Structure formats: C-alpha cells, structure tokens
Image (tube, rainbow, N blue to C red):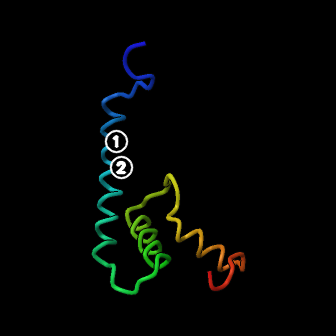
Amino acid sequence: MSGSMFQYSAADLDRFRQVQRLAYDIALRVESQLQVGITEVEACTLIAAAQTECEVIQVFHDPVGLRQRVQCATGACARGS
C-alpha cells in the first residue's frame, strides 16, 4: 500500500492550515493577557471568549479548565481539590 490512506485535497489542507493558524493566533492573544496569579479557569475563559470573538463554532475539545468550571458551577466538583 503506497501513499496515505487519507486522501486530502489541496483545498482541504489549506483550510486545515487556516484553522491551525487561527488557533495559534488565539493562543498568542490569550498569552498576552496572562498575569501572575491568573487561574487555569480564568485562562480558559479568555480562550473561549477569543474563540467567540473569532466566530469559532466548533472545536476539537473545550479547554480543560472550562469543564472544571462547569462542574464546579453545578456542584459536581470537590471543594479544595
């Protein structure tokens, strides 16, 4: 078997590059806002806000800290952990 088992067009690969560039640009934007003492949850909230500003409608996965925030907001996380 030669070549890749996944056949992507040049347009597919260009779109992938664009999406990866956007993700990296969002990470750089958030990095510029980080300060000593900011929590992971706060950083993840900044990521989510930047994604919304860039009209991101689908992500591979939400930042881990956001899941923790949602769990804690619903009382599903252990206090002090």
Residue at left offset 43%, top offset 71% = 49
Residues at badges 2 and 1 in contact (C-beta under 8 Å)?
A: yes
Total count of labels: 2
In the displayed structure, does residue 41 sit left or right of residue 13? Answer: right
Q: In the figure, 22 relative to 78: above or below?
A: above
Q: Which quadrant: the N terminus?
A: top left
Helix, strand or loop for disc 1: helix
Residue at the spot 33% in from the left edge and 36% down from the top edge: 13
Closer to the camera, 56 or 42? 42
Mark 2 residue element? helix
Q: Is residue 52 above or below residue 15?
A: below
Q: In this view, does 46 lie to the left or right of 71?
A: left
Q: Quadrant of the C terminus?
A: bottom right
Q: Name the residue under label 2.
A: 19
Three-letter code for the amino acid on which mark 1 is drawn:
Arg
Q: Where does label 1 land, which residue?
A: 15
Task: Kindly give the residue lying farthest to the top in the view shown.
Answer: 1
Side (left or right) of 11 relative to 7: left
- Comparing 28 with 10, the one in front is 28
